[in-house]
Amino acid sequence: MTDQLQTIDETAQQLRLKPRTVRRWVFLRKVDYVKVGGAVRIPKSEIERVISEGTVQRIPRGTNFQERVTA
């Protein structure tokens, strides 16, 4: 595995979240993680996935509401 691993605190800091939120994601298995001994580590690729899945695409200027709903 060539993917870098981050601690829960490092992940939370990068995403500007509380570590408790990241721990909850691990507990609920909303993110992939690796256990090294007893420590939980989160791959950087998983952080990138969370960011990309949470990205909301912009709506082009001039698009009216009805076009947005049916698109």
Image (cartoon, rainbow, N blue to C red):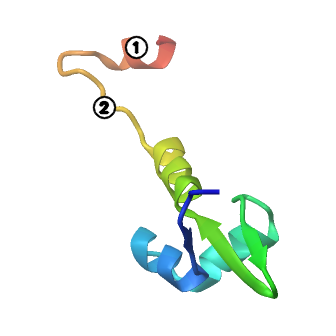
Upstream in sequence: badge 1 or badge 2 = 2
Residue at which label 2 appears? 58
Task: Decide: is 42 above or below 45.
Answer: below
Report how many numbered discs are placed on residues in the image.
Answer: 2
* In-front residue for pair 27/3: 3
Binning the other alpha carbons within 10 Å of mark 1 as few (below 14), some (14 to 19) or many (20 upward) gives few
At x 47% / y 12%, what residue is drawn?
71
At x 56% / y 58%, what residue is drawn?
3
* In-front residue for pair 48/38: 38
- Of badges 1 and 2, the one in the foreground is 2
Identify the residue at the far front of this view.
2
At x 72% / y 79%, what residue is drawn?
40
Binning the other alpha carbons within 10 Å of mark 2 as few (below 14), some (14 to 19) or many (20 upward) gives few
Task: Decide: is 15 above or below 40.
Answer: above
Image position, residue 10 (x, y; %): 48, 80
SS at mark 1? helix
Image position, residue 4 (x, y; %): 53, 65
> What amino acid is at disc 1?
Gln
At x 47% / y 19%, what residue is drawn?
69
Contact (CB < 8 A) between labels 1 and 2? Answer: no
Q: Is residue 67 left or right of residue 60?
A: right
Image position, residue 15 (x, y; %): 44, 69
Residue 36 tag number = none
SS at mark 2? loop
Image position, residue 44 (x, y; %): 52, 61
* In-front residue for pair 56/25: 25
> What amino acid is at disc 2?
Arg
Location of residue 56 (image quadrant): top left
The quadrant the N terminus occupies is bottom right
Identify the residue at the far left of this view.
61
How far apart, in angstroms, are the residues tagged by discs 1 and 2?
Answer: 16 Å
Residue at which label 1 appears? 66
